[in-house]
């Protein structure tokens, strides 16, 4: 079992994430299934079949492309200069930096960019990415960021939980670099910044009056995250 962080710990992890912590708590069972998924447990103890991880890496490459599209959409949906700057910075970081880092990481697993770029999107990848984009198109900027939040914040929580759990296997575990990447201060700061921005946006966009609808969006995105893990296992 992965050391699941409590909602109060989440607030400490993301100091301004009071509203986000409530969304997480409202979807507690789904959140636990996501961050304590069998795939994540396999990362923790090193037992995850390597074909499952390679399949995940390919699909994650394709996912990141749509993630960048989502932030480009966020720039269009932005109502203030802060909104536009934040979205453009995120899209630029994904396209100019994160994709390159992902490609370099995948090379260590014998995966080339041409191979990943030409791979078909699995159903879970299609479902998740198109759901995020649909929420952004049909809703406002807050709807879009809430749909993105389980990915951004969940990976930070998983990375931190695995890195601090004494049960995590760090000896001859091929997935230790992945854990360290998401537990590292660079990614943790990205997640903190994202949480703080969403909290400010939530106040501006009347999130309290929309809590039920936003909780449904957060929950659906969380369930799709778990399905994204599962597709790796199913492909092994």
Image: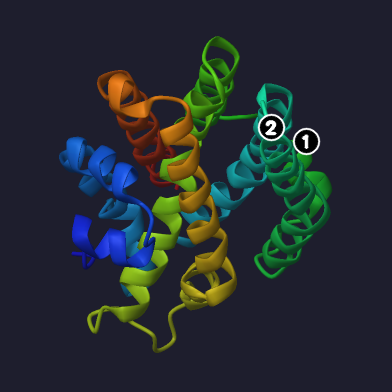
Q: What is the quadrant of residue 206 in the picture?
A: top left
Q: Position of residue 57 (x, y in %)?
A: 59, 52
Q: Nearer the viewer, mark 2 or mark 1?
A: 2
- The residue depicted at 45 percent of the width and 48 percent of the height is 236
Q: What is the quadrant of residue 14 in the picture?
A: bottom left
Q: Position of residue 40 (x, y in %)?
A: 34, 58
Q: Relative to the observer, which residue lies in front, 196 or 31?
A: 196
Colour pattern: rainbow
- The residue depicted at 35 percent of the width and 40 percent of the height is 226
Q: Is residue 223 above or below residue 3?
A: above
Q: Is residue 4 left or right of residue 119?
A: left
Q: Position of residue 141 (x, y in %)?
A: 56, 26
Pick whichever of labels 2 and 1 is earlier in the sequence: 2
Q: Is residue 150 above or below residue 2?
A: above
Q: Is residue 38 above or below residue 165?
A: above
Disc on res. 40: none
Q: Is residue 222 left or right of residue 53?
A: left
The outermost residue toward the bottom is 171
- The residue depicted at 69 percent of the width and 26 percent of the height is 73
Q: Relative to the observer, which residue lies in front, 197 or 178?
A: 197
Q: Position of residue 18 (x, y in %)?
A: 30, 49
Mark 1 lies on residue: 118
Q: Is residue 1 left or right of residue 168?
A: left
Q: Secondary structure at mark 1?
A: loop
Mark 2 lies on residue: 80
How busy is the neighbourhood of tag 2: few (under 14 within 10 Å), some, or many (20 plus)? Answer: few
Q: Secondary structure at mark 2?
A: loop
């Amino acid at each position: 079992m992965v050391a699941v962080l409590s909602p109060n710990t989440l607030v400490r992890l993301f100091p301004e994430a009071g509203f986000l912590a409530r969304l997480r708590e409202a979807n507690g069972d789904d959140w636990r299934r996501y961050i304590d998924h069998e795939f994540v447990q396999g990362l923790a103890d090193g037992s995850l079949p390597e074909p499952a991880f390679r399949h995940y890496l390919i699909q994650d490459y394709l996912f990141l492309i749509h993630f960048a599209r989502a932030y480009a959409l966020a720039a269009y949906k932005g109502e203030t200069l802060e909104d536009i700057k934040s979205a453009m910075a995120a899209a630029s970081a994904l396209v100019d930096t994160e994709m390159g880092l992902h490609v370099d990481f995948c090379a260590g697993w014998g995966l080339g960019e041409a191979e990943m770029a030409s791979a078909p999107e699995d159903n879970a990848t299609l479902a998740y990415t198109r759901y995020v984009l649909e929420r952004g198109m049909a809703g406002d900027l807050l709807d879009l960021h809430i749909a993105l939040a389980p990915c951004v914040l969940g990976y930070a929580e998983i990375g931190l939980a695995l890195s601090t759990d004494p049960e995590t296997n760090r000896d001859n575990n091929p997935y230790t670099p992945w854990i360290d990447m998401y537990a590292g201060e660079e990614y943790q700061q990205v997640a903190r910044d994202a949480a703080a921005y969403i909290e400010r946006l939530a106040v501006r966009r009347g999130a309290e009056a929309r809590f039920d609808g936003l909780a449904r969006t957060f929950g659906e995105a969380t369930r799709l995250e778990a399905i994204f893990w599962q597709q790796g296992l199913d492909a092994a």
